[in-house]
Amino acid sequence: MSVTVVEHPLIQHKLTHMRDVETSTGSFRRLLREIAALLCYEATRDLKLTTKTIATPMAEMEAPVLAGKKLVFASILRAGNGLLEGMLDLVPSARVAHIGLYRDHKTLQPVEYYFKAPDDLGARVVIAVDPMLATANSAIAAVQRLKEHGAKDVRFVCLLAAPEGVEKFQAAHPDVPVVTAAIDSHLNEKGYIVPGLGDAGDRMYGTK
Ligand code: PRP
Ligand code: URA
């Protein structure tokens, strides 16, 4: 199991703007989409390649192309959709799964309200996306559901993680690598990441 913190300066600069309480809803969404494409670049670094014969205007060549079936991005609703947009900017042909989960504010346990995924998950690389890995209860449940539907090669991409969440996720899914832009200090008593950026879904969509 691996955790990769992507310390690229562009990501860190954009993340600082996202954290800033003064950042508008529109800017927050745009920044998340931009960072998502950069995180996707990292999470797909080890995808397998094959070759195909093409003709350039100059010559025939054996050129590299992605091997296997199209990727699946699995968005953990709602906030996962903010990352999904940027990932699809980079891999427009990817298939998409949606996992509807919200975190009960009192128990911090995930409540599932929707699941829809391509039916051949076992034959594809599946990248689950959610900006926040806090207690990790939502991510653990979402990945569990993907595995129940046959997914074997799963990765998890988030924007921010709490150390407690990373540890718990690793214990639950040691086979699933995590890619994140930062691991923050801690969770507060309400399960929010500190310093974090607040409630990602609310900041993306202007709700409270
Ligand atoms: C947020 C976030 C994650 C979850 C993380 O979603 O997008 O899904 O909390 O917390 P956890 O690691 O403690 O489970 P939320 O439940 O607020 O739903 P939303 O995306 O619909 O706003
Ligand atoms: N969900 C969020 O949106 N933010 C947090 O800090 C924790 C969970």
Image: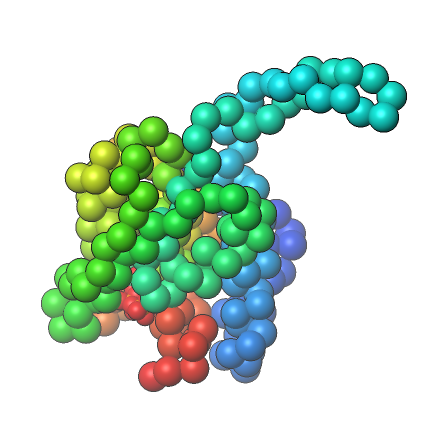
Q: Quadrant of ligand 1?
A: bottom left
Q: Residue 182: horizontal and vertical position, in percent?
A: 46, 53
In this picture, residue 189 sits left or right of residue 20: left
* Residue at point 43%, 69% (across, down): 197
* Residue at point 17%, 39% (across, down): 148
| Quadrant of the image occupied by residue 75 | bottom left
Q: Residue 163: horizontal and vertical position, in percent?
A: 33, 51
Q: How is the image coloured?
A: rainbow
Q: Residue 173: horizontal and vertical position, in percent?
A: 24, 37
Which part of the image, by quadrant, shows the N terminus? top left
* Residue 181 visible in this rendered orientation of the protein: yes
Residue 115 vertical placement versus 73 (above, below): below
Residue 67 vertical placement versus 208 (above, below): above
* Residue at point 63%, 19% (across, down): 52
In this picture, residue 8 sits left or right of residue 54: left
Q: Nearer the viewer, residue 17 or 39?
A: 39
In this picture, residue 84 sits left or right of residue 9: left
| Quadrant of the image occupied by residue 204 | bottom left
Residue 125 vertical placement versus 89 (above, below): above
* Residue 7 visible in this rendered orientation of the protein: no
* Residue at point 40%, 69% (across, down): 200
Q: Residue 86: horizontal and vertical position, in percent?
A: 54, 56
Which part of the image, by quadrant, shows the C terminus? bottom left
